[in-house]
Every structure is written in C-alpha cells, then in structure tokens.
Amino acid sequence: MKNENLYNYILGIADNSLILGQRMGELCGHGPNLETDIACTNISLDLFGQVRSYFQYAAKIAGDERSEDDIAMLRKEREYKNVLLVEQPNTNFAYTLGRQFLFDVYHLAFLKELQKSTDLTLSAIANKCVKEVSYHERFSSDWIKRLGDGTEESNAKMQEAINDLWTYTDELFHQTNADKAMLAEGIGVDVTKLKEDYYNRVNAVLEVATLNTPESKWFQKGGKEGIHTEHLGYLLSDLQYMQRTYPNMEW
Amino acid sequence: MTTTEQNIDKKLIAILEQVSDPEIPVLSIMDMGVVRSAIISDGVVQVEITPTYSGCPAMDVIGDDIKKALLDAGYKSQVELILYPAWTTDWITPRGRQALEKYGIAAPLEAQADKDVLLHGKRMVKCTNCGSQNTRLVSQFGSTACKAQFQCDDCQEPFDYFKCLK
C-alpha cells in the first residue's frame, strides 16, 4: 500500500468510534429508562455514522478489493487499533457513562484539532463529527454530575467506575508510529498536547460531581498496538457474527 | 463560516421538491437544505447531498428517492454524498421551519438559546401544540439523533425539538 501510515492513522481514529459505538449499541432495549436508552443508541448511531465516513476513506486509500465492510468486520482482534478504554464492558450504568465521559472529553478535543488537518477529507469528517460529539460530551458530563452528586449509592458506584476506568485514560495520549508520521505531514493531531486540557476538564466535572480524582499513577496501555483486554474478543464475536456466518453478506 | 452556496439547476427544483425526508414526510429535502448541488451534465443529473448527522439512516433512502423522482421526470442521475461544508440547521428554509412546527417538531433556536434550553433548563422552546413556552427538556436525544425531547407543562403535550447544529 502506498500510504500505509495514513491508512493506519484513519483506522486508529475509526476503531475507537466503532468499538464504543458497539458498546453503546448493546444497550438498545436495555437502557435504565426509555429516554436514556434512546440517547445511548443515538450516540451509538452517530459513532457508526462517523465510522462509515472513515472506513470509506480508508478503503479508498487501500485501493484494493477491501470495502468499508471488510475493514469493519473482517479484521482479527490484534488488528484493531482502538484504545483499551472504549472496549471496557457495560458493567453497570456508572461504567457505561464513565467510559463515555472519559472518552468524550478526549474525542471532542481531538476532533477540534483534526479540523485543522491538511487532509481535506479528514478535516471535513472532523468538521461534521465535532458538532455531534459536543452533544455526547454534554450528555455524559451531565450524567457524571447527576450520579456523582446524587444519592450515597449513586455516588459510590460512580466513584468506583471512575476509579476502575482511570487506568485506561493515559493511553489516549500515546503516540503511535502512524501518529508521528501523520503529525510530521500536517495531517495528524499531536495527542500529547491534548493531555493537560483533558485532565483539567475531567477534573472540573468530577469536582462538580463531588467525586474524587483517582490518585493512581499506574496506567494500562496496548490497545493502539493491537494488544487488547480480554473484553474485545467477546465484543468482536458479537460484532462480526453476521459477516463470519454469511460471508460477503450485504444489506 | 463555510460556504453555503447551493448550485441547483432551476429546471430541477420542482422535481427535487417532491422528495421528502422519510423521517419527516412533511419536509422536502430542498427545504431541509440537504441538496447542495444538482446540475445536468451530458444528459445526466449530478446531485450532491449532505447528511444532517453522520449516522443519519435516511440518507440512503433519500438518495434512492432522488434517483426515482428524476427518472420519473426523464432524467438519469448520479447522487453523491458530500461531507463538506457540514450541514447546519441554518440551511432549513423558513418554509421548512413552518412545516416542522406544523408537524409537531419545534424548530431550532439560535445557538445561544439552544444551549440555554439544553444545558441550563431555560424554558424557551415553544410548545408545538399550544404555543406556551412553559416547556422543559425531557431528554437531550429524542426519536432521532437530530432531535431532543421536550414536554409542555401547560398542556402536558410531549414533543420533539430540532436541535441547533452549527
């Protein structure tokens, strides 16, 4: 492939949305109430829509037989480049919203920078997505405040989720080789520069939510390089079931 | 501000106005502002449409409906989805806003007012049933990604509000 770095770079961005979209989609029919159920699945739909734009572009870059569906459905676990955070399961509603919030704050800041990309397709996609993701971020930070500053029980559950998910936040700011190459070409975003604002924003919301910022400095990593937690395999078996069972199936 | 110019052949306007958003049947895609260009080149109509939201499931149907409407009028066509410039609620025409309200969907407010009602609980969205502004946000996401759910505290009617997107 001529432009392998760009291809990998797009997949790195898209896989986060794909896997998180699948996680939120799992709540279809299982949300705590009708409105929240619809909100979660709408967020999922936004993310899948974004993924289509990215994968269509990636398929064009690949320039071979690969279609957007092949890229989404026919890779193996090790070939997915999403961060570990987004593959974490819907343990309970606090985990679902905690994961969403910790990703949304990053996602919004990332897309704002990607809008400046010299790659016109990527900047157009970012331009579109940033509007949607700002709604996601409002939704999830509202819920963090509501649950954190809610009852004793909701506070304890929200704190537990934040404590557990915290270990996956630092990976968001790790640079891959594709990141470095694309940054040098003016196409990519310097994720290391997003880190300080990220933690400031997250801490500000946690404070309003009367939640404590976890103190642990131990962070997990590996997703961006394809080394995932055990949860991804189960998620993929669900996600890929139709394509694996009925190869080349189309809607 | 991005360019908002449309480039639509006058002959095609009436045909394209017959195509509606499948999720909001009273609203034509022209009043919705999703058709960005439609020109006839070598006997084939080249249409560019832009999605309201990335995941909008209506886009495939809209594309097919456009092709069918044009074919019925004797034109072959190609429909392309473009992402830039990104769609904004500013592109909904005044007639489109009226159609929305009549259908029971409150039209989008300006950006600041939109923030006030969605984030700070201000009561400003007009109830599509009784016109009262004594309305409150029920959920930031309504029946589709582009809408939020509201309820009127005077007539009790629940209704959708089309969120401002800029």
Image (cartoon, coloured by chain):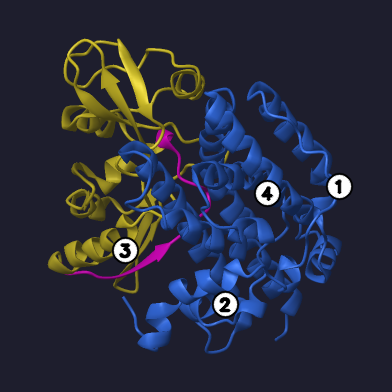
Q: Label 4 to label 1, Cα distance in Å? A: 13 Å
Q: Residues within 10 Å of mark 3 (few under 14, many from 20)?
A: few
Q: Which residues are magenta?
A: B74-90
Looking at the picture, which amino acid does disc 4 mark?
Leu
In this rendering, the answer to whether B93 lies above or below A167 is above
Which chain hosts label 2? A
Q: CA distance from mark 4 to mark 2?
A: 35 Å
Foreground pick, B153 / B10? B153
Instruction: Identify the secondary structure beneath mark 1.
Output: loop
> Which residue is found at the position 52% from the left and 72% from the top?
A234
Callout 1 and callout 2 share a chain: yes
Chain letter, yellow? B
| Residue receiving disc 2 | A60
Chain-order first, disc 4 or disc 2 = 2
Marker disc for residue B60: 3
As drawn, A213 above or below A208 = below
Look at mark 4 in the image and give the residue it sits on.
Answer: A165
Say whether residue B79 is magenta: yes
Residue A118 visible in the shown view: yes
User: What is the three-letter code of the residue carrying label 2?
Assistant: Lys
Does residue B97 lie above or below B20 as drawn? Answer: above
Chain A painted colour: blue
